[in-house]
Structure formats: structure tokens, C-alpha cells
Image (tube, helix red, strand yellow):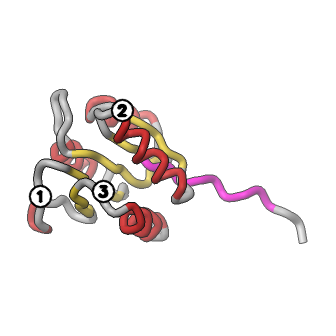
Amino acid sequence: MGRSAPPKKQAVLVVEDEPILRMMAIDLVEDAGFEAVEAADADEAVTILETRTDIRIVFTDIDMPGSMNGMKLAAAVRDRWPPIEIIIVSGQVRLSEEDLPDRSVFFSKPYDWQKVTATLRRMASH
């Protein structure tokens, strides 16, 4: 049997303004078997989404400086890039299902790594 190249990792865009938390989220995403792409704020995230077509999931904090917070970013992603799945996290606010864009999941910080990992894998398997 011929050996094929390993499948290309699916890309997850991590949007988090706090460098330490961003590194932790990147570790989580990479440990789950994905390629992590990082953005420090929503404006940078939109620029990345406009140039890369391989982003499958956006993992964003709500509380960020700049012209958009994570909720506005999630709404923009849902509007402009409908196939992308969204994970939203926050240490400040708690969201209910009604507050979330379609096909997005919310975790409050500190989040459960295993639950987030399971959610990433479930989203990627669609």
C-alpha cells in the first residue's frame, strides 16, 4: 500500500488580546491537532480571514480593544464567512444560547480544556 502524505491540519484562528492567554489558547488548539493562526484583535482577525481560505474555526475572546469586540467579530464571521464555526470565550460576560450567532459555542473563562478540545474536534468533523 502506498503511503500518502498526512492530511493537512485544519486551521483555527485564535483571537485574544492578552498574550499569555493567547499562547495558552494556541497550545490548546495545537494539542487538539490543529494549525493555530493568531490575531491580537478583531481587526487583525478580519484581515487574516480576508486572505486565508483555510480557516475552519474562529476561537475568540469577547473582551478586546479595537473597533470590534469578540461578539461583533463573531457576527461579522457569521455574515461574511458562513461555513466557519465559532467558539466564543469570556471571563467578564456570560452568554446564553439566544445571544450567540448560529453554530457558535460559548465558554466562560477559565474554560475546561477538555470540553473546548472536544468542541474543536466536533466542529472540525462536519
What residue did someone put label 2 on?
19
- In the rendered image, residue 91, in percent from the top left (x then y), is placed at 18, 49
Camera-side residue of 3 and 24: 24
Residue 3 vs residue 82: left or right?
Answer: right
Badge 1 amino acid: Arg
- Give the number of the mark in front: 3 or 2: 2
Task: Check disc 2 and report its element: helix, strand or loop.
Answer: helix
User: In the rendered structure, which disc, 1 or 2, sits on the residue that comes first in sequence?
Assistant: 2
- Location of residue 51 (image quadrant): top left
Label annotation for residue 87: 3
Number of labels in the image equals: 3
Label annotation for residue 94: 1
Question: Which residue lies at the image location 47% right of the left edge and 52% below the top edge?
Answer: 29
- 5 is within the stretch colored magenta: yes
**Magenta segment:** 4-12
Question: Which residue lies at the image location 53% right of the left edge and 51% below the top edge?
Answer: 30
Badge 3 amino acid: Ile
- In the rendered image, residue 68, in percent from the top left (x then y), is placed at 17, 35
- 83 is within the stretch colored magenta: no
